[in-house]
Amino acid sequence: MARPPADNGVLGAAPDTDGLTVTVAVGSSLFDDRFGLANRRPASLTPMRVFRNDRPESAWTGGDLLIQICANHADTVHRAVREILRATRENMQILWRIRGFGSPPRPEGTPRNLMGFKDGTGNPQGADAQSLIWLDHDVSQPWTVGGTFVVVRLIRMFTEFWDRISINEQERIFGRRRDSGAPLDGNAEFDTPDYAADPKGFAVPADAHIRLANPRTPETARQRLIRRSYNYDLGVDDNGNLQSGHIFVCFQQNIQQQFETVQSRLDGEPLEDYVQPFGGGYFFVLPGIRTSSDWLGRGML
Ligand code: HEM
């Protein structure tokens, strides 16, 4: 099959870089027998585990590669997709694709998810975050040093249902104030909740999302992860309900010790009545290119 010419100018003249980034990660299925990579699989990279509230749809789950394309405008992202498809025509087929978007900060600071709450407040920062993300040693697969694991979860929100409950109930489900983002035992967004001072959960309920996700104890400190989620909007379903929600994206050194441990604690949380995970997968983000003759995934061969 002939490849498309290099210069057929898809979509006309090239735009400015527009903040374009392309992140490439590999799924566990890449390490089955098809490509001779079976002995290169990173230990933590398994097929995505199915949790209690999950209804995985094969049309939205898994894949050998995950390509996350970000830019300031949807037009730039679309263009990048087309260029990548042209160049990989004989070798790659899209399994699923979802368009994410962020919210402008309202009134300021942290962006909000489609339930109206600030999302990202509790993320570890700086050197703390770095030490939870990057693989700095992995004796079983030395080629993975410098990479990180990413978990993507496509989570539908039942927004019409959510919009019918009181703000008080919504805040108790997350454990934070909707408007300021402050924990329910604090005053400002970045106040640290003090669960030890409130073991019965009078202020921040014991089953609040933030309390289950991060109990803030010494034993759970290395289970923390870094979230970088987006909103999605797929229109309307057959019943006239909005098909929109959360593209949950989190980065970590070890999927079982971080994402799966946190998700297991969240199993059965009150938020489950308003959300439904239906797709996504586990992937390993390839270590970056180090020299001009290097390429992504080189260490894996
Ligand atoms: C915190 C929303 C799914 C892990 C939060 C917060 C919100 C939120 C509003 C508080 C603000 C913040 O710290 O960012 C949601 C929604 C979800 C969802 C709407 C699904 C539709 C998940 C999942 C996980 C997770 C699947 C991991 C398995 C966390 C963690 C925190 C957090 C670790 C920070 C807790 C802290 O350090 O205090 N989430 N989340 N979330 N969420 Fe979620």
Image (tube, rainbow, N blue to C red):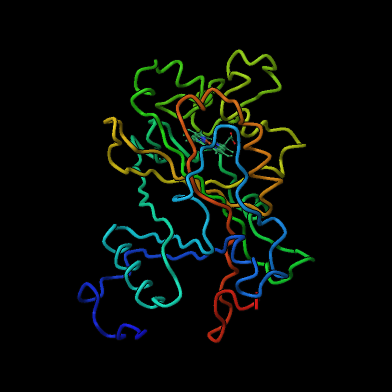
Which quadrant of the figure has residue 207? top right
The answer to which of 120 and 60 lies nearer the viewer is: 60
Residue 200 in the image, given as x and y percentages of width and height:
67, 14
Q: Quadrant of the N terminus?
A: bottom left
Residue 240 in the image, given as x and y percentages of width and height:
26, 31
User: In percent of the image, x 65 and y 69: which residue is there?
Assistant: 33
The answer to which of 251 and 132 lies nearer the viewer is: 251
Q: Quadrant of the C terminus?
A: bottom right
Q: Is 47 rendered above or below residue 161?
A: below
103 relative position to 139: left or right: left
238 relative position to 85: left or right: left
The answer to which of 11 and 236 lies nearer the viewer is: 236
Which quadrant of the figure has residue 36? bottom right
User: In percent of the image, x 49 and y 27: which residue is there?
Assistant: 182
Tally of numbered discs: 0
Residue that lies at the very extreme toward the right in this rendered image: 139
Residue 124 in the image, given as x and y percentages of width and height:
60, 45
Q: Is 262 rendered above or below residue 131?
A: above
Residue that lies at the very extreme toward the left in this rendered image: 12
User: In percent of the image, x 36 and y 46: which residue is there?
Assistant: 102
Residue 62 in the image, given as x and y percentages of width and height:
53, 54
